[in-house]
Amino acid sequence: MGEQKESLRKIITTLALKNEEIQNFICSLKQSLQNLEANSTRVQEDLESEFSSLHSVLDELKDGMLTRIKQERASRTYELQSQLSACTKALESSEELLELANQTICSAETDSFTQAAKDIKDSVTMAPAFRLSLKAKVSDNMNHMMVDFTQEREMLQAIKFLPVPATPEILMSECQVCDNTVMVVWALPEPDSKIDHYVLEHRRTNHDGPPRAREDYPWMVVEGIRTTEHTLNGLRFDTRYMNFRVKACNKAVAGEFSEPVTLETHAFTFKLDAGSAHQNLRVEDLSVEWDSSGGKIQDIRKDKNRTNSPMHSPARTAMMSPKRAPSARIGRDRFTAESYTVLGDSMIDAGQQYWEVSFDKESKAFAVGLALRSLGRFDQLGKSNASWCIHLNNWLQQSLTAKHNNKARTLDCPIPDRIGVYCNYEEGTLSFYNARNKLLIHTFRTKFQQPVVPAFMVWNGSFTVHTGLQVPSIVQCGQKRNSGTSSSNASLT
């Protein structure tokens, strides 16, 4: 009895679930019927509107062509009637002269005959009949106003509902990635004059294989593209790759998306290692601001939780890239004393890298460059052989200097508000540029013996780092052109 009840309960549960499923499906069917009615009404109204518009065009064209025929007929009628009137008058005058000549030649009066004959001769000479052109001024032929709508009729008979546009194909060989700009080029299998626009979607990814259905980053949409190519400008490449797909749209419907393609977007991306920052520097993401009260706040935080450094937080450890290794020694000491420094969290041990930093030009002091991870916690940038930098001093008078190993060279150039930093690890090149116009400020040439990290210093001021940037083409060209001509660290005095 108990087993039967349990079995019956399962049947009841199954039936209840099935009934709910059917009810949901019935609701879906009712909604589909409502949508069908609404959509049918909409497309029917659109069809009537299109045909009404077509009729209006045809009526307007008919009226215009009829008007031209009437104007041509009126013009020719006027010319022919004018010529007819002139000819009628000339004929009447000629008949009068003919009758007068007949009367004269039959006259028996010799004296009057001579004078009459002379008068008739003069009248004939001046008669309109002999000054008329006996050729019609205009033709009565109106064949040039004939029409043949055979081709147009065939076009009208070929009118049908808009087909779904074909699927475009992205042409990988013609796509370009350069200067944080991506140009995407695509083509349709066959030309289609009905295409109204294209929709391009792109998303960031760190997956180096074929594009996946799901990614951590959403698709970004660019609509209303009228040509078969589009350029995305001013991108920040904070992932290794980008996926792209495109679809064609006519005025009625959109086609299927193309097969997604993956383009490599290599750029140097890093964060600031807040765990290395001097206690007077307030680090927020990629921005740093001098905080004179930072020491007191840090002491309080240190007493409460000595493991609160972002460098060793679980979230930060999970997000680290292979290059984003922990500091040279576990729990790196903060910079202290007058070394108001903070380091980047990513090491450079190969390739060409580029980043920019914008800073408050009213800062009492600011520096940007490279340093070894082993840079001492008391070391100021440029004061030892473990760091290279350019340094802005606003304390007594404004100056910009290049510093390394406690040697300095004053740089005679306008002080920009944004500096670009270029590093070629293999060639031992570290160059600084005015990021606005890409003019070279200074170049160090050395031989890096171990990996280096971006390094920054600020006192009584602030700065913001800009990463995810590719090496600008103008910088690469300038490096090739100026190779071997820029100043080296050995010339610092």
Image (cartoon, rainbow, N blue to C red):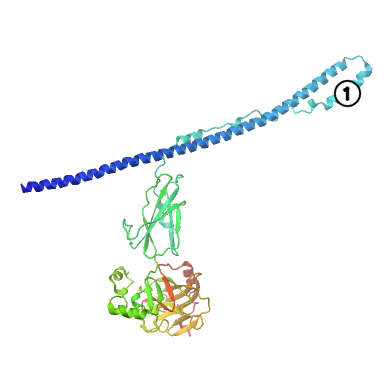
The quadrant holding residue 64 is: top right
Q: Can you say whether 84 is above or below 431 in the image?
A: above
Who's the residue at 9% across and 47% down the image? Answer: 5
Q: Can you say whether 101 is above or below 202 in the image?
A: above
Q: Is residue 254 left or right of residue 8?
A: right
The quadrant holding residue 319 is: bottom left
Q: Can you say whether 452 is above or below 55 in the image?
A: below
Q: Is residue 150 left or right of residue 372?
A: right
Q: Is residue 159 visible?
A: no
The number of numbered badges drawn on the structure is 1
Q: Residue furthest right?
A: 111
Tell me the kind of residue under disc 1. Answer: Asp
Residue at disc 1, secondary structure:
helix
* Label 1: few (<14), some (14–19) or many (≥20) C-alpha neighbours in 10 Å: few
Q: Is residue 75 left or right of residue 394?
A: right
Who's the residue at 49% across and 75% down the image? Answer: 441
The image position of residue 124, as x and y in percent, is 83, 24
Q: Nearer the viewer, residue 40 or 249?
A: 40
Q: Which residue is mark 1?
A: 119
The image position of residue 169, as x and y in percent, is 40, 52
Q: Is residue 284 visible?
A: yes
The image position of residue 89, as x and y in percent, is 77, 24
Q: Residue furthest left?
A: 1
The image position of residue 484, as x and y in percent, is 48, 76
